[in-house]
Every structure is written in structure tokens, then in C-alpha cells.
DNA sequence: TTGTTTAATTTAAACGTTTGTTTAATTTTT
DNA sequence: AAAAATTAAACAAACGTTTAAATTAAACAA
């Protein structure tokens, strides 16, 4: 799919508004006003509001084949490669947090039918790369053998999004340093925590009796 | 706040519909139809749709003071207590996953003003209990000293919710055993994974050079 | 370059529905 | 007889979508 500048601008505005106020909480009039266009342009360009959502999701997730391969082809050791992967993952989900939020709330419901095959395909490919890396690490004796591999990425992404979705109460509970921006916190403290958790998980050997 | 049977029934219906179709995606007519009542009853009982949301959240989160104390006062060792806490946490969030989803979307937006002080207070109390437990474990030499304590619960909850919010693509990617119910999977495989991750994180000592 | 024609874009206005809320009358309970 | 609960009907406002006219851009022949 090719989109012109105006369509991409509508995508940017729509992504922000859908993420903040949900699909049904955002009227096409509000989108048009924010984007500086006439409401009829949305039907003209995308056909309907629902098709706008579908094309938005496919456009925004089209480049989700992250550079995992290059991160894994370095000469670093296994634990350093884990760090590299997590740095990449957190950077991507933080950059794309809004479209992820839309997916979590509008697509995860089975009740919306969206053509989203390309997203699922990319997800499978990314998982295969990570799975192979971990299995190699297990064969090399670095990683523990009884790890639930499919649940590792959910732990990485979940930690980030649970922080993001609870930012409001998180700030109230822990009084974050107001001089540290969200971006800084995510790419330092939060990323370090996730790196630590995953490296620990991958190298953990159950104490006897468990 | 005291609510009669009819109000509680409306809460149950509303919770499910708000979680599935969002606040703005659920009309009070749809709620009334599903609950078998007249639409005017919602204004009569709750004042407005927005006040229904507020009272729903407060009602559904009123009992979030989980039995952490009892789980920590047992004679189990520290690692077994971690297991106990996680079992409790996962049970609670799974049981209350719908209201959590509403909170994640409708409240995490700063733009909705809901009186939710009691929820924040409970959260702080629960965190204090967990913080004290971990610090005791650190003093006892069981837990590592350089753990980010405020981010531990986000990792527990986040793993669960990332699975829940991506269930649709998760199933497509990993072909879950269709004979294992969601409840079973959560309380066995998923809970075990989280237990392992947190115990590993709490006992992990960074290799030299990191 | 010109003027002319065709296509693409943009607009304001209107369409029928659905929205949350309120009213006033009715029924049920106390 | 008084209070509480329930109902159908109506309200204006907002919704997604479509229409037909107006404007702009592109293509083309001279």
C-alpha cells in the first residue's frame, strides 16, 4: 500500500486520538478538525471509519521486522545479546506504544474483524528468531533448559505496558523524579530492570525440591 | 457505599461490556437491554453514564486488599513465599481482569477525572507490604540487593496482561492446546513462568563486568 | 507558451441513526 | 396514603456517511 502525505498525516492524528480516547470515543469530525481537513475526506481517502482503522494498523505495523538479525550476528556473548535484543524491543514498543495500545484494546477483542495477517506473520517471524537464539544458548550451556520460551517476550513487553498503562497511579505511588522524562526513565531504569529480569530468568536453575 | 442487588447486577453487565467494547463503545441502551432494565434506571440509580463508570470502578476495586499478610506470615522460606504471593496476585488479576482493563484504558488517560483515591491508597498499602518483604529477604541474604523493587509487580501483572491483551495473536502464533482452558493455562503454565521469572530476578547476581 | 478538457480534490450541507438524558405518567412497594 | 421503582416517550446533540456542487491540478492539443 502506498499513501500520500495527507493520508499519512491523517494516520498520525488518528493514531494519537484512537490511543487516547479509543475508537468509539473519537469521532471523524474530531479527527478532521485536528488534521485540518473536511470530514468527507476520510471517506474519500479510506472509505469509512472502520477501514481507516484497518489501514492505520497495517500502515503502522508494516515495519515491525526489527533488526533482530543484526543484533544477534555480533560477536557478543549470549548475555550481552540478550541486552541487545531487549534494548531493541523496548525502543520499538516505546516508539510505537500508541498503535500497540490500539491493538490491545480494539483488535484483541475477537469481535472486530480486521485484515491483519501481515502483523501476525511478522510476529511469528520475530518469535522464530528469538526461539532459535535461546535454543542455541541452551545447547551452549548458557541458558537454562526449562524456560517457557513463548512467554519471554510477553514478560518484556508486559513490563513496559503495565508501567505505561498504570503511569498515572505509578507516579502517585512511587513519586518519580519529575526531572527525569518519560523517555529517559524508559530507556534507562525500566530497560535495565527488564534486562536483569530476562537474563536472570534465562540462567535460573530451580533449587532442588521445586 | 451500599448497593442493592439490581445495582450490582448492572455493575456486572456494565463491567463486561465496558471491558469488551470500551466506555464509548457501549451505549446505556445496550447495557439496559443486556441487564433487562429500562434505560432510565441507570440515571435513576447512578445519575449518569460517567457516574456509573466511577461507581463501578470503586465498587469493583473495593476488595483489592488481598490476603498478602497471611501469605507472608507462614513458616515457608523466602522463595516459597514468593510463590505464594504470585499465586495470590495472578488469581486476583485474572478474576478481576475486566475491571483492570477498564482502568488501563479509561482511567490511565489523564483526561478522565474519576474519584479513585481509595484505589490508589490500596495500591500503596499492597506495595508497602511487598517492599518490606523483599527488604527483609535482602537483609537475610536470600534476595539480591540491586533489584528495582517498584518494577517487580509491574513485571508480574504485565506478563499476565500482555498475554491477555494479545490472546488473539498469541493463539495464532503458538497454537495453544485447545483442550486446555484459559483458566487452566493461567493458573498453571503462566503462573509457573511468572514465579520462575520473579524468583530468578530476586536471586540474580550480576556477572562481573556488567 | 496558450486555452480547453478531463480528472482529482475539497467543500458545505443534508441524510437517517444513535447517543445520553429528562420528563411525566404509571405501577409496585412500603 | 406516601414513597419508591419502573415505564414509554420525547429532547437536543452528535454520530458516520453520502451527495452534489465548487475548486484545484493534470493532461493535452494548439
Image: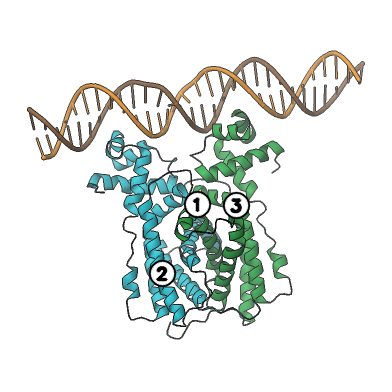
Chain colours: A green, B cyan, C orange, D brown
The residue sitting at 52% across, 82% down in the picture is: A205
Q: Which residue is drawn at 56% across and 52% down?
A: A100
- Give the chain of mark 2: B
Is A134 in front, or is B206? B206
Residue annotated with mark 1: A108
Up the image or down, B89 lies above or below A209; here it is above
The image's mark for residue A13 is none
Q: Where on the picture, by quarter, is residue B192?
A: bottom left
Mark 2 and mark 1: span between their CA atoms? Answer: 31 Å
Q: Which corner quadrant of the image does residue B126 belong to?
A: bottom left
Question: Which of label 1 and label 3 is nearer to you?
Answer: 1
Query: In the rendering, at what x and y percent does residue D16 appear?
Result: 52, 33
B84 or A4: nearer the eye?
A: B84
Left or right: where A146 falls relative to A4? left
Quarter of the picture holding the C terminus of chain B: bottom right
State the residue position of label 3.
A117
To which residue does mark 2 refer?
B130
Please state the horizontal and vertical placement of residue B43, each as a whole percent of the image. 31, 36
Q: What chain letter is assigned to the residue under label 3? A: A
Mark 2, secondary structure of its residue: helix
Amino acid at each position: 500500500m502506498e499513501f500520500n502525505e495527507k493520508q499519512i498525516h491523517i494516520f498520525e492524528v488518528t493514531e494519537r486520538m484512537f490511543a487516547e480516547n479509543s475508537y468509539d470515543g473519537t469521532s471523524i469530525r474530531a479527527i478532521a478538525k485536528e488534521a485540518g481537513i473536511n470530514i468527507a475526506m476520510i471517506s474519500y481517502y479510506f472509505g469509512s471509519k472502520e477501514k481507516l482503522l484497518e489501514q492505520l494498523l497495517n500502515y503502522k505495523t508494516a515495519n515491525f521486522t526489527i533488526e533482530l538479525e543484526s543484533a544477534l550476528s555480533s560477536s557478543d556473548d549470549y548475555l550481552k545479546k540478550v541486552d541487545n535484543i531487549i534494548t531493541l524491543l523496548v525502543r520499538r514498543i516505546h516508539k510505537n506504544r500508541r498503535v500497540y495500545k490500539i491493538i490491545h484494546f480494539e483488535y484483541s477483542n475477537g469481535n472486530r474483524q480486521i485484515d491483519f495477517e501481515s502483523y501476525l506473520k511478522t510476529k511469528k517471524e520475530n518469535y522464530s528468531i528469538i526461539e532459535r537464539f535461546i535454543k542455541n544458548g541452551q545447547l551452549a550451556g548458557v541458558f537454562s533448559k526449562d524456560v517457557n520460551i513463548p512467554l519471554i517476550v510477553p514478560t518484556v513487553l508486559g513490563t513496559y505496558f503495565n508501567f505505561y498503562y498504570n503511569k498515572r497511579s505509578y507516579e502517585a505511588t512511587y513519586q518519580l523524579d519529575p526531572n527525569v522524562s518519560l523517555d529517559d526513565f524508559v530507556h534507562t531504569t525500566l530497560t535495565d530492570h527488564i534486562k536483569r529480569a530476562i537474563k536472570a530468568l534465562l540462567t535460573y536453575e530451580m533449587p532442588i525440591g521445586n
